[in-house]
Image (tube, rainbow, N blue to C red):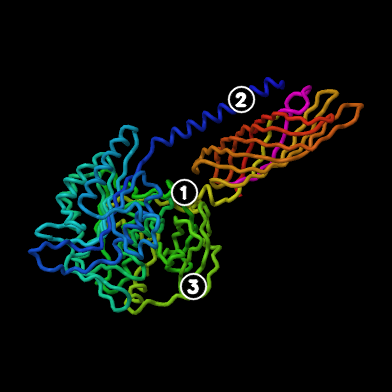
Amino acid sequence: MSRSALSGFAGWLGALLVAAAVAHTGTTQAATRLHALVVGNNAAFPVTADEQSPTLAPLEYADDDAAAVSELIGGVAASLHLLTVMDAATQALYPKLVATARPPSLAAVEQAVGAIAAELERDRARGDQSVVWLFFSGHGSGSYRGEPALALLDGPLRRDYLYQRVLARLPGALVHLLVDACHAESFVRPRDSNAEVVSVAPEAANALLVRSTLAGFPNVGAILVSNRDAQAHEWDAIGHGVFTHELLSALRGAADVNGDRLIEYSEISAFMSAANRGIGDARARVAISLRAPELNRRAPLLDLSAYAPTTVSWLVGVSSRRGAVQILDERGRRLLTLHNALDLSTSLLLPPSSALYVVARGEEAQFSARPGQVTRFTDLEFVRSQSRSRGLSGANLERGLFAVPFGRGYYEGFIDNAPDLVSVPLSRDAERDELAARASGPARAAHAHSLRLSLAGGLSNTIANQLEASFGLRLGLGPAASHGPWLGLEGGQTSEAPLSEWRVLGKLGWLWQTTPSRLRVYAGPRAGAGIVVQRVEGQSTLSSAVGTFGGAVGLNGRISQQLGIFAEFELAAHLLQLDGSTRFVGAPSSWIGASWEM
């Protein structure tokens, strides 16, 4: 092959890779865009001069609820509006959110809804699908001055306002309405063992879920506290409203009964049912009212595979062998709780942290969770826990909450008695093993194997002008995750009587890759050193040390869970000394090969 042919081939392959990269980028532009309005208000309903003093005590954790939901949803939200006044403790736990939070007033709600409505118009113009989250945590009343309402700092958010000024302005989007509210006459549970539970009447939150009214919004789904003969409360041990903690646990993957990374209404409903089933004290048991969007009863609230791998970590293969499991971060926040049955193994999305703690059955395990890192539950080393009970009330709730295991069997039984919900597909027998293997979806597929071994053949330029292209082999070892170091060893040979040339090069580089999918674009710089040997028949052999540096761009396609094929274009320069002079030679090369994730 002539040098011109090699240059043409290299140019063609490079253009192909650039076109593929552009096409790949273009296909990701038309996507689902999520917008969120998150409200948390600890304060009670405001009191006017002609009214009596308020009978409601401030809540403790509505600001924590809003901050935790914002932290979770912020990783995939195209726009996020956080309305809350965080106390000192909450600001210390969520320092990155302090600057973005605004007071939870009616004016702020109006402005946020207007901004989201404008985003929906832009989504439609691009051809994107829109999803909206509306989350509220705080006080609620079934009859505040005669109407159901939620408490904001400057007044009530009434039911009519929700329908006419919020939901009616969000047409064309799937809307998820999530409300953790308590009744106006309730008592708020203060800290530790002397606390009282919060009394919740059914109208407090369920008033927002009147079917005759929501029927006019088939694009809206809702999950709300709905206790008829029981009580729900905040709990000091988890630092949240119990409803919100269960919801966050479900959304981080604990409810993902079929491992597809899509958290659906039926899964959340069954998960929260199991979480509360073991609570013997009716005053503490949380009941929910749930309605999936009529337009799509299987519309997911959250797609965990949408998170960029470098922004999250994963704990995979969480099984039933340790019973109820709590996961806490280094600041003491309880991120989630779950209790898997024998027929369920789950993967959990966690925030990156220098230290996370898994607590189960009086023992705990510590592990680091770097961005993009996957930790196997079976690799954790448990030791006796040093934590102590927070008091009799907390111990009673601890024994009941999440006491009933959640799994495929529980889910199927629950769905059989929930005709309004549509079941997720559950794999059977041989398919179940494959489903468990890819339990984390695309994110797990990219990270369950930390390294990618590659073997390639290709063409490269030569040092000697008299020779045509050099044929070579290359062995490479690089990251299976989004980025990381790359090592390569390559050799090449060509001959055209009476001249022949050999080369052996070792290279070190760094690769960045696009979001995990079956087709990934990668690129990065490389540098290395080696030796070049030239021999002329009947004459002396010349050899020289050579240094090389440049960069590469490639396209990798995944055939199976571990096997892939790739094409790569590398543009490098060689620096060497031959015939007593230093030479600088351009060396484009093209490679095609196979890769195996380990």
Q: Is residue 286 above or below residue 439?
A: below
For the residues labelled 1 and 2, the Cα–Cα distance comes to 36 Å
| Callout 3: SS | strand
Q: Which amino acid, by three-letter code, is at mark 3?
A: Glu
Region rendered in magenta: 461-479
Give the residue at mark 3. 363
In magenta segment, residue 2: no
Q: Mark 2 or 3, which is nearer the eye?
A: 2
- Residue occupying image coordinates x 27% and y 51%: 134
Q: Is residue 33 left or right of residue 312?
A: left
Residue 115: image x %, image y %?
Answer: 27, 42
For the residues labelled 3 and 1, the Cα–Cα distance comes to 29 Å
- Please state which of residues 299 and 459 is positioned toward the viewer in this rendering: 459
| Callout 1: SS | helix
Give the residue at mark 1. 441
Residue 581: image x %, image y %?
Answer: 81, 30
Q: Which amino acid, by three-letter code, is at mark 2?
A: Gly
Res. 291 visible in picture? yes
- Please state which of residues 14 and 577 is positioned toward the viewer in this rendering: 577
Give the quarter of the image for residue 96.
bottom left
Give the residue at mark 2. 11
Mark on residue 5?
none
For the residues labelled 2 and 3, the Cα–Cα distance comes to 60 Å
- Residue occupying image coordinates x 33% and y 39%: 129
